[in-house]
């Protein structure tokens, strides 16, 4: 009998208007000084005011830190943690996409630890997280990363990415309000939406999957695949935004507990070397990785195809698994994301370095139902460059 461990954020509010729960939750911590970590765009368009204004009106001292960036480099994380250490904060609130949320939870924990952020990195760090840190409330403004329900903070290094990970990075409260996603532009909606879909797909085929994560993942795939095109085409569509918000949240719960695999492992070097957004990195690789590993998870690929809206009644599992890959390709194309590495102006000469960095992502690769070795990773990058699905040569 296999034993599965399930870990969830202690408290989540979801649904339209759930931001109204912020003030009552903040009051529970009796903070004198609150740090809001966000990104400059959200500050400029006034969305952060929806979070900060009620707090200020209720007498809280609030610092808004917006010196962040997508795919945040390690140096940015170091700067923010140093800033938090130099002041006395009692509560951290993250507002934004995955990058802002990752930085918020990283800061909440490492603000009470000695040493540099670099010393806590998963692949190369020498220090261990030992204290829970400051309480943190995470409020996503995109439907994609699932960062509000995971214990991982991703940082960009010179040519790849690494993470700081510990259950102390989990939010104390997550507030997932689809109303906050209305201002997300189509390109970001597409990229973050396919990111969320990838979380669900990879969680479902993960070697660590279990019945609970399977249920979360399949529901997420249904919700995201049926609403993403509409959310991209008409960002003001309330129903589509709500479906995407819930789908992203469920996908986050699924992949946090079952893990992601090959797509994410190969996406990290793309982001690190070419600064392609995490969502687009996942999107361009998703069909090629799934096509390559298809034979190792045929039955699950059939389930995914059905969740994507496919009719499996007259198809064998084998046929449905092939259709699943095609359906994933179509979705990426429909939302306007380039379908090949060439479409991102990545030269063929870069594939070997991408492969060398991809091989290093052993923590993630270990969850793939098909073991992916160096030759496999090189073949997948080549197929994503050529735009042709390939399978392993036996």
Image (cartoon, rainbow, N blue to C red):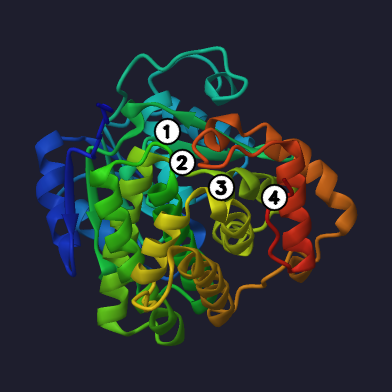
Q: Which residue is mark 1?
A: 107
Does the rendering let one see residue 333?
yes
- Give the mark nearest the N terminus, 1 or 3: 1
Crowdedness of circle 2 by 10 Å Cα count: few (<14), some, many (20+)?
Answer: many
Q: Circle 3 sits on which residue? A: 264
Residue bearing mark 4: 392
Mark with earlier residue (3, 2): 2
Judging by the rendered image, the residue that carries numbered circle 2 is 103
Q: CA distance from mark 3 to mark 2?
A: 19 Å
Q: Secondary structure at mark 2?
A: helix
Dot 2 or dot 4: first in sequence order is 2
- Marks 2 & 1, CB-CB < 8 Å contact: yes
How crowded is the residue under tag 1: few (<14 C-alpha within 10 Å), some, or many (20+)? Answer: many
Q: Is residue 70 visible?
A: no
Task: Tell me what residue is drawn at x 18 percent, y 65 percent.
Answer: 15
Q: Nearer the viewer, mark 1 or mark 3?
A: 3
Q: Quadrant of the C terminus?
A: top right
């Amino acid at each position: 009998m296999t034993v599965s461990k399930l870990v969830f954020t202690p408290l989540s509010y979801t649904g339209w208007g759930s931001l109204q729960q912020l003030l009552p939750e903040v009051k529970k911590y009796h903070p004198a000084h609150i740090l809001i970590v966000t990104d400059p765009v959200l500050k400029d368009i006034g969305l952060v005011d929806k979070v900060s204004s009620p707090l200020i009106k209720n007498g809280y001292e609030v610092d808004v830190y917006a010196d962040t960036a997508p795919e945040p480099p390690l140096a940015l994380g170091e700067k923010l943690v140093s800033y938090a250490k130099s002041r006395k904060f009692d509560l951290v609130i993250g507002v934004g996409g995955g990058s802002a949320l990752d930085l918020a939870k990283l800061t909440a924990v490492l603000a009470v630890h000695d040493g540099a952020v670099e010393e806590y990195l998963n692949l190369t760090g020498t220090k261990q997280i030992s204290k829970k840190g400051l309480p943190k409330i995470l409020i996503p403004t995109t439907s994609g990363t699932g960062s509000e329900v995971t214990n991982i903070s991703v940082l960009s290094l010179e040519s790849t990415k690494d993470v700081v990970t510990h259950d102390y990075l989990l939010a104390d409260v997550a507030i997932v309000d689809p109303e906050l996603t209305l201002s997300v532009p189509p390109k970001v909606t597409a990229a973050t939406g396919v990111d969320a879909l990838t979380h669900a797909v990879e969680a479902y085929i993960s070697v660590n999957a279990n019945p609970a994560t399977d249920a979360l993942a399949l529901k997420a795939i249904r919700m995201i695949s049926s609403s993403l095109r509409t959310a991209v085409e008409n960002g003001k569509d309330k129903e589509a935004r709500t479906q995407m918000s819930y789908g992203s949240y469920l996908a986050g719960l699924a992949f946090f507990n079952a893990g992601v695999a090959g797509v994410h492992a190969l996406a990290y070097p793309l982001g690190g070397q070419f600064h392609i957004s995490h969502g687009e990195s996942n999107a361009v690789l998703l069909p090629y990785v799934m096509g390559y590993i298809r034979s190792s998870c045929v039955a699950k690929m059939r389930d995914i195809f059905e969740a994507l809206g496919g009719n499996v009644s007259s198809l064998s599992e084998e046929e449905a698994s092939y259709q699943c890959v095609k359906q994933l390709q179509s979705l990426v194309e429909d939302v306007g994301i380039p379908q090949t590495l060439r479409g991102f102006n990545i030269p063929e000469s870069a594939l070997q370095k991408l492969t060398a960095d991809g091989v290093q992502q052993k923590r993630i690769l270990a969850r793939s139902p098909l073991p992916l070795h160096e030759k496999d990773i090189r073949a997948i990058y080549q197929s994503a460059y050529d735009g042709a699905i390939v399978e392993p040569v036996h």
